[in-house]
Each structure stands twice: as C-alpha cells, then as structure tokens.
Amino acid sequence: MEMTFDEFVRVVCAIPDRLADPHFRSQHLFVRHRGDFIVDFLGRFETLHEDWHHVSKQVGFECSLPHKNRSDHRNYRDEYTPELAPLVAKRYEHDIEAFGYANEVSSLF
C-alpha cells in the first residue's frame, strides 16, 4: 500500500525521535551533544558543490562531485499544505533552529 505525502508526513510527525527510523529522526541529534555542535563543518544540500569542494580540499583529495540520479520533480514547497507545514515545523523545530532554516520554513506558511 502506498502512502500519500500527506499521510507519510502525519505518520512521521507522530513518531518521537526515540522510536524514529534514523532516516527521519531529527538530524541535530547526530551532530550535537548537550546542545553543542560536535562537528567541525556542517555542509548544506543547498550549497553541496561548494561544501564538497571545501571538504575535499581540507582532506587533500580535491575532486569534483558528479550529479547522478537526477530527477525532474516539483518543488518540495508545493507539497506542503497549510495543515502540513506547521506539523513539520513543530516536529523538526530543533533542527530548524540548529541549522538556521527559520526563513525557509516561514515561507511555507
């Protein structure tokens, strides 16, 4: 049985992090300890190529990052209804704060 995006979001938002699959567990849990970041660098998908260049240069293995499995799909913002956006914002509020996504999230409302 396939789930709609709406159904999937509602299920994920109802599962607490302690029971969540790592794929949709709050990401700040992987990079913070007692509120402090435990990583030296945190890349962003939005700046993936620039961040990859930075990391590869730091480790002495400079190479380009190919783009594979390219897909054509709608903008993710189009999937968030007025009912879903607040659910996701609440579920991932610590990630939104930790990673500086408040502006992007507010644009969904």
Image (cartoon, helix red, strand yellow):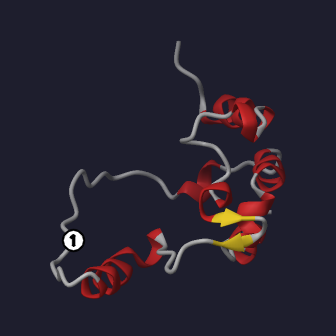
Pick whichever, 57 or 34, lies toward us.
Answer: 34
Residue 43 horizontal side relative to residue 8, left or right: left
13 on left or right of 32 = right
Mark 1 closeness class: few <14, some 14–19, many ≥20 residues within 10 Å: few
Image mark count: 1
Query: Quick check: 40 above or below 73?
Result: below
Residue 16, image quadrant? top right
- Where residue 105 appears, x then y in whole percent? 73, 66
**Residue 24 position within the rendered picture, expressed as x and y whole percent measured from the top left:** 60, 42
Residue 60 vs residue 53: left or right? left
Q: Secondary structure at mark 1?
A: loop
Closest to the observer, 92 or 35: 35
Quarter of the picture containing the C terminus is: bottom right
Give the x, y percent position of residue 17: 73, 40
The residue that label 1 is drawn on is 65
Q: In the image, is residue 6 above or below residue 79?
A: above
Task: Identify the residue at horizontal 71%, vertical 62% (top origin).
Answer: 95
Near-viewer residue (95 or 39)? 39
**Which amino acid type is marked by label 1?**
Leu
Can residue 108 be seen from the camera position used here? Answer: no
In the displayed structure, 74 sits above or below 15; it is below
Residue 81 seen in the figure: yes
Residue at x 45% of width, y 69% of height:
45
Left or right of residue 66, residue 75 in this image: right
Examine the image and state in which quarter residue 55 appears: bottom left
Residue 18 is situated, as x and y percent measured from the top left of the image, at 74, 36
**Above or below for 82 versus 39:** above
